[in-house]
Image (cartoon, rainbow, N blue to C red):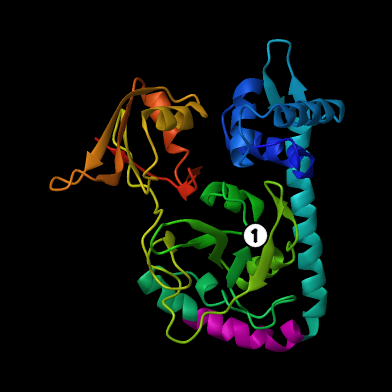
Amino acid sequence: MGNDGNDDFDWSKAICSTLKSSDVNEVKKLRKLVLLSLQLDESDKSAKKSFKKAVKQLEEDGKVKLDADGAIKLKEKKRKRDKEEKKKKKKKKAKKESEDNEEEDEKSDDKKEETGEKSSETNDDNGEGSQSVDKNAPCVGNPQGVTRLFLGNLPFSVDESSLAAFLPGEVTHIKWITDKETGKFYGSAFIEMDNSKSAADAVAMAGSKLIGRPIKINFAPARDGDEWPPVKKVVSGGGQAGGSGIKAMSAKPENCLKLFIGNLSYDIDDEGITKFFANVDAEIKAVRWLHHKDSGDFKGCGYVEFWKTEACEKGATLNGKNLLGRPIRIDWTD
């Protein structure tokens, strides 16, 4: 990638986000992950320069601590400040909502107590709390109580963990929008929030940047006949229909050293896959590509073996990342 456009990225946010969501504490390793998340080439000198400049600024601002030996970490004050600001915003919104609905609450108190007693009796039998009853309750900013949202202009390096860290409330289901034939990620998704209030808070964040890109967030109530929410927590598919693509990883075997890799480009080779996992310092011991028995054609999948369990775990974090234009599917295997 060339030099143009590197200053357009929100480097500071990408660096802080990577530090929060990973165990990386070395500047060089951090740079690899940040460049990967921004879809930039590791050899891009301009990108390296922008990264270095952003780190220096963060250090001057007191947001990160940089040691002489190259170790870097977020300062505890920054972490606490972020949490406190989040709590303040939630309290402020909750207070406003309470004031707006005070009159309605007073009128319905008796009714809520009565229905609450009845629902608690039935929920004692099935183990469900009253929260599910109020999931779609109308609230400020969400009068229809919609909990299904559409997200657009997502960075291609986004994954379940980075999205969950970005949005307020709890994301219970994600449906990545991918091409049915190629599995290519379109940069959009449908998500289900845990309740209408969380959905309203998420929509209020429309335009906020995630890994350097301003995100589109809209209410998207499910249509009649739509299977929503999906059975699995994380799925992929073309449009709003079902399809194949990146799925949630299975249970990890003990002392795992091998990963299954799928949805690969037919241009992939040993050197390419080795460099891909090297981005997270996961050194490969061996690669085995799978081919059709009859034709000998490459199936677009294979297995990679690592020297250490730690390297295998690092490699697994690349599940869903783009490799040669396609989101790679990674899963544990014996």
Query: Where's the C terminus, which quadrant?
Result: top left
**Does the segment drawn in magenta span residue 117?**
yes
Q: Which residues are magenta?
A: 104-118
Q: Can residue 58 be seen from the camera position used here? A: yes
Would you name the residue on which mark 1 appears?
Answer: 153
The residue furthest top is 69
How dense is the environment of label 1, judged by Cα within 10 Å: few (below 14), some, or many (20 and up)? some
Relative to 223, is 266 on the left or the right? left
Residue 181 versus residue 31: which sits nearer the camera?
Answer: 181
**Image quadrant assignment for residue 219:** bottom right
Q: Type of residue at label 1?
A: Asn
- Considering every residue shown, the one lying at the far left of the view is 294
Q: Residue furthest right?
A: 60
Helix, strand or loop status at disc 1: loop
| Residue 250 belongs to magenta span | no
Residue 214 percent coordinates (x, y):
73, 56
Q: Position of residue 289 (x, y in %)?
A: 27, 36
Q: Nearer the viewer, residue 4 or 282?
A: 4
Quarter holding the N terminus is top right
Residue at 36% x, 73% y is 125
Give me the residue at 86% from left, 26% from top: 60
